[in-house]
Structure formats: C-alpha cells, structure tokens
Amino acid sequence: MSNSHFTIALHILARMALVAEKNKVITSKEIATSVNTNPVFIRRILSLLEKSNLVVVQYGTGSGWKLARNPDNITLSEVYQAIKQKPIFGLHRSIPNQNCPIGKGIQPVLKYYYSDVEKALHSKLAKTTVADLLGETLTLSSQELHS
Amino acid sequence: MSNSHFTIALHILARMALVAEKNKVITSKEIATSVNTNPVFIRRILSLLEKSNLVVVQYGTGSGWKLARNPDNITLSEVYQAIKQKPIFGLHRSIPNQNCPIGKGIQPVLKYYYSDVEKALHSKLAKTTVADLLGETLTLSSQELHS
DNA sequence: ACTGGATGAAACTATATTAGTTACAGAGGG
DNA sequence: CCCTCTGTAACTAATATAGTTTCATCCAGT
C-alpha cells in the first residue's frame, strides 16, 4: 500500500456516508472531484473496499456506489484491513547473510514483532468508525467556513 | 522512510550489540556483509542513528561503530523515532477539493487520528529492547543450525 | 432490443521513491 | 605522513505510485 491509500479510502467512505444520509449513491467521478484526483484511481480503491464488503456497486441507470453498512458500523480497522497491500514494516529487500547469526535469525523474530505491532494498530483503529470520522470532519469544515 | 529502513536499523543494532559483548567496534562494510547490501546504504542509516545518539563513531586506526548505550537500554520505539522520515499514513498527495465539506475538513481530523495511532505504535515498540531482539535472534539462529 | 451513463480492467506514460554505485574529501590513531 | 574508514554528494538503476486512455461490460429505463 502506498501510504496515502488509507487516507483516500477514508475520504471515499466519509464522502459516501454523507450522501448515505439522503439514501443516494455516488459515482467514482463525483468522488474523484472531492478527492481531487481521477476516477480510475478512485475505482481501484473502491474495488478493494468492495472485496471486503464495505461498499456495494449498482449498475444501470442511477448507477454508483453506496456503503454496504451503516457508517457507525464500519471501523477504521476494517478499512485498513481492506486496503492494506503491504505490512507496515517490510523485511530486508535481499536475503541477509545466512552465515551471520544475526542475518540467519533476525527475520522470523522481526516478523513476529511486526505482526504484534499490527495487532496493536488494529485495536487502536477499531475504536473509530466512519461515522465518527464524518462527524468530526463536518464539525471542522463548518467551523473553518467562518474563519 | 522506506518500510525496510526500520528492519535494516534493527539489524544494524543487533549486529552491533553482538560485537559489543566483546567490547569491539564494527565497520559499515562488515555490517553491509551481514545485511547483504552496500556500505553506503548502511552508513546512511547509521547517520540517522547517530543523530539520535543511539550509536557512536570512532575515527582513526581501529575505526568503526559501536552502540552509545547498553542494548537493554535502547527500545525499538527510539529506533523507530530515529529512522522515521515519513508518518505511517500519508495524507492526500494533492489537496482535496475545498468546496466539498469532506475535502475541506478531513485532513486535520486524519492528522489527529494518525498521530494517535503513532502514539499507540510507540508504546508497543517501547516494550522491546535491542537486547531482547539480539537474544531472540541468537536463540532462533542456533536452533535453525540444527534443523 | 436499444440507449446511455457508469463500471472493470488492461495498457501505457509520467513521476517519485528507494536502493546501488562511484568518487573523493575529511577524520584521526599509529 | 600513512592507512583505513567515514561523510556526503552525484549519478544510475530499479521499483512503486499515480494519472491517462481505451474499450468491453453491466443494467435500469424506454
């Protein structure tokens, strides 16, 4: 995962949660306008979210996307899980020297540490929902309109 | 930070902790052999670790590197802090649409969330030291020699 | 059926990031 | 003064990321 994909995914979901209040769907093009990027990029992220059953696509007239569940029932942990392509920390790019005791033993140890760190990350992310994100975002953007 | 820099930094420190037991220093070339990469790359990481006072360099005859402190007094949190160039999650690459309430308000909210996540990460990483890492690595590598 | 607006995915380009390499001045103990 | 290693810049190569174009596919509405 590029480290911006998670941000884009959250932006998409918050934007969808906004229109969900009016029971409407939204197109990748509309989302792209909000994110300020191109629709294909958005669809690539949407495709990942769809595979994790966080969003649903509709075809035909009035086609577009909507949340698969209520926004207060989607946690950031699930979103991260859906988007994640690579772990937070990568191992060595090339295999370390197996004749060195460190080179030989370090990878499994780090793998274990890193998976532990990701678990901590998930429990933190699980405490926030898309509804929380939408709420705070709207609060902030309406405040800033007056500044 | 590339997501492998943290791994390389930990490899370096574990390797240095190993020679620290014999009160010796180690050169970037020796470390590079263990990591299986080139000395300049190692020196770039060492330079970051030095700025955070985790390692010390010696010049002249018998030159090389050593830990600035006992390995049981260096936590992975400090190492991560020393290495980190970018936050875990990046924001939008290009500024989101300021005419959209989501685009306008989302970045500060995410910034706050992300800094919270990093704090959780640090408390997790703070529980492990370089000495722990070295110990587990040696245990594992000696086990695997018999497999 | 046919239409129209949207998706899915592949292919390609452009840009940015990351790592590898070369080169050379600077440090300092012997 | 010598020797070995560091510090850093400059360059190249490889990879990752995002933007763009294109076109087949989907399906509600007519």
Image (spheres, coloured by chain):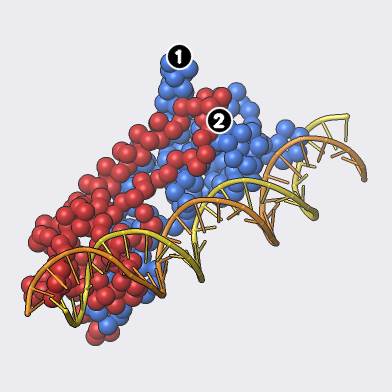
Chain colours: A blue, B red, C orange, D yellow
Q: Quadrant of the C terminus of chain A?
A: top left
Residue at (8% x, 75% y) in the render: B22
To which residue does mark 2 refer? B97
Tell me the kind of residue under disc 2.
Answer: Asn
State which quadrant residue A22 falls in.
Answer: top right
Q: Nearer the viewer, residue A74 or C20?
A: C20
On the question of residue A16 being in view, the answer is no
Please give the chain letter of the residue carrying mark 2.
B
> Under tag 2, what secondary structure?
loop
Percent position of residue A82, x then y: 49, 49
Tell me the kind of residue under disc 1.
Answer: His
On the question of residue A138 being in view, the answer is yes
On the rendered structure, is B128 left or right of A84?
Answer: left
Residue at (24% x, 85% y) in the render: B146
> Under tag 1, what secondary structure?
loop
B5, above or below B15, in the image:
above
Question: Is there CB contact under 8 Å for labels 1 and 2?
Answer: no
Label ID, residue B14: none
Q: Nearer the viewer, residue A27 or B114?
A: B114
To which residue does mark 1 refer? A146
B48, above or below A42, in the image:
below
Percent position of residue B63, x then y: 15, 72
